[in-house]
Amino acid sequence: MKFDVVIIGGGKSGTLAAYKLARAGKRCAVVSAGHCLGKTFRREFIALGGTFLNGDRVTGGNVEGGRVQYVRTENLGENTVLEAGHFILCTGKFFSRGLISTIANIYEPVFGCDVLYAQDRSEWTVDDFFAKQPFENFGLRVDDSSRVYVGGNVISNLYAAGEILAGEVDIEQSVEKVCRNII
C-alpha cells in the first residue's frame, strides 16, 4: 500500500498531523494501536479520504540509504507493507509505549531512534512525587526539521511530533512544524 505519509500513532498529535496533511492534499495513513483522542480530526481525516488503521501497531520498518522505505504492521502481516515518502512518529512516551524504559536504558521500539535521557538512572526522578520529574523531558533526538536520528545519523524522511520529543513540547507547534516540512 502506497501513501505520501504514514503516521505512526493516533493520539492528538497523530490525528492532527493526519488532518492537516490530508487537507493539504497528501494521501495519508494513520496506524493507531490505542484509543484515538482527536475524534473530530479523525472523522475529518477519513472524510478527506484518509486511511485509519485503528487497533493496529507498527512492528518495524526497513531503513536503507538513510530513508525509511516501508513499515509493517501487526494486523496487515508480513506480506503487506506501508510505503510512503514520509513517516511521522507520534507514539507518545512511556504510558503509550512510544518509549520503553528498562532498568538500564530507554529506547524507541519501532526504529531504534536515538533517545535523549540521563544515563544515570538515579537522575530519572526526584523524591517529591508531585514535583516535575526529570523523565518527563526525555525523548527523541531530532534535527531542526524534526527529523529523527538513528545511530547518530538523521533519517531524511522520518519525523517526530508530539510528546515523544525531548524537552518541553507544545504538541500543536511540533505538529505544525513537521507538516510544514512535509508540505
Image: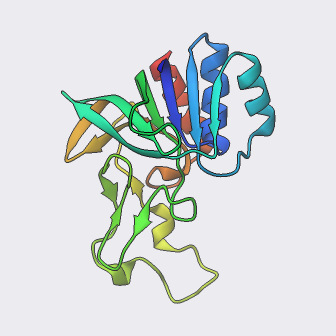
Looking at the picture, tell me which residue is in the foreground, 30 or 182. Answer: 30
Residue 79 lies in quadrant: top left
Judge left or right: residue 65 versus residue 172. left
Q: Name above or below for residue 119 compared with residue 7.
A: below
Q: Residue furthest top?
A: 25
- The reply to whether residue 138 is visible in this rendering is yes
Judge left or right: residue 147 versus residue 136. left
Residue at position x 48%, y 45% in the image: 74
Residue 53 lies in quadrant: top right
**Applied colour scheme:** rainbow
Q: Name above or below for residue 8 compared with residue 34.
A: above
Residue 17 image position (x, y, % from top left): 60, 30
Judge left or right: residue 34 versus residue 40. left
Residue 107 image position (x, y, % from top left): 35, 60
Q: Name above or below for residue 23 compared with residue 67.
A: above
- The reply to whether residue 157 is visible in this rendering is no
Residue at position x 59%, y 49% in the image: 33
Residue at position x 20%, y 47% in the image: 151
